[in-house]
Amino acid sequence: MDTNEQLSFLIQYLLNEDERFSDIEIPEDENAKFRLYRSLVNVRPAMPASVDFMRVEDEYLSEIMAKKGVVNIADLTPVEDKIYLWKGDITTLKCGAIVNAANSGLTGCYQPCHNCIDNCIHTFAGVRLRYKCAEIMRAQGYAEPTGQAKITPAYNLPCDFVIHTVGPIVNGRLNGTHCRLLKSCYKSCLEIATQNKISSIAFCCISTGVFGFPHNEAAEIAVGTVRELLKNHDLKVIFNVFSEEDYEIYRRLFGGN
């Protein structure tokens, strides 16, 4: 199958899983077709898929990733010892682990085509990631506490692992508890990376999206915490940003003009 046929197969499988979608027709336009596929993946409950579905999904997402272009940490230039700053799509990073800014349910964003990092990571990793996260949560028996983290395979992403952490939600004025919990996110992720012998980790801007943490303060905590903890952790850290605003904030923290 070519990628168009793969996508049609995946969509039809997902439509057949839920009778609510029985009247939906698969569009011809490639962009509209991918948007439908992503929407169906986003709303799909955490459950197993058939061997055929997973095989085709792996093939399709591999092609998608090749088109997007993979960025290897080996090709990046550090801004200081063991620390990198990179602006781009975290799902394209080839490194030991990427960090997902998750919610307390840990099974991803269920809003169709939402542009949050949680949605993007689950979309391009494939449906097995949500199912794996659900297994972890069932075994745990309670929502993931803020400031802690869990590790999973990355499935169809070019990194080896995804580390999921729940950042603090800031409603109103920033306070010391928010700052302490955000620092705990970075600490928990670095500890998990070290325990799993991961040599490199890419952090997104945890809590700065819909969670409302002010960007400047979040970056200061992120950089300060990582610098402190790298004294006792032998791994490379990438600060991944997506917006020009965040890039400039981090660049200034590393001495840029």
Image (cartoon, grey):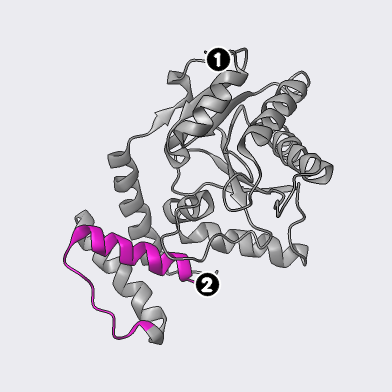
Q: CA distance from mark 2 to mark 1?
A: 41 Å
Residue farthest left in this picture: 28
Mark 2 / mark 1, whichever is N-terminal: 2
Instruction: Find the magenta span and give its range.
Output: 21-44
- Percent from the top left, x then y, of residue 44? 47, 71
Q: Residue at x 46, y 65 (%)?
A: 42
- Does the magenta run of residues contain 234? no
Residue 16 sits in which quadrant?
A: bottom left
Three-letter amino acid code at disc 2?
Answer: Pro
Residue 124, placed above or below residue 10: above
Quadrant in the picture for the N terminus: bottom left
The x, y position of residue 53, in whole percent, is 37, 65
Which residue appears at 63% of the width and 42% of the height? 206
For residue 45, which numbered disc appears in the image? 2
Residue 102, position in %: x, y?
62, 53
In depth, the one of 19 and 58 nearer the eye is 19
Based on the displayed image, in which of its 4 quarters is residue 142 positioned? bottom right
Label 2 vs label 1, nearer the camera:
1
Structural crowding at the residue carrying mark 2, measured as other residues with C-alpha within 10 Å and reported as few (<14), some (14–19) or many (≥20): some
Residue under pointer 1: 79
Q: Please, what is the three-letter code of the amino acid marked with disc 1?
A: Val
201 on left or right of 23: right
Residue 176: name its quadrant.
top right
Q: Are marks 2 and 1 in contact (CB under 8 Å)?
A: no
Disc 1 on helix, strand or loop?
loop
Q: Is residue 136 visible?
A: yes
Foreground pick, 214 / 37: 214
Q: Secondary structure at mark 2?
A: loop
Q: Residue at x 80, y 44 (%)?
A: 175
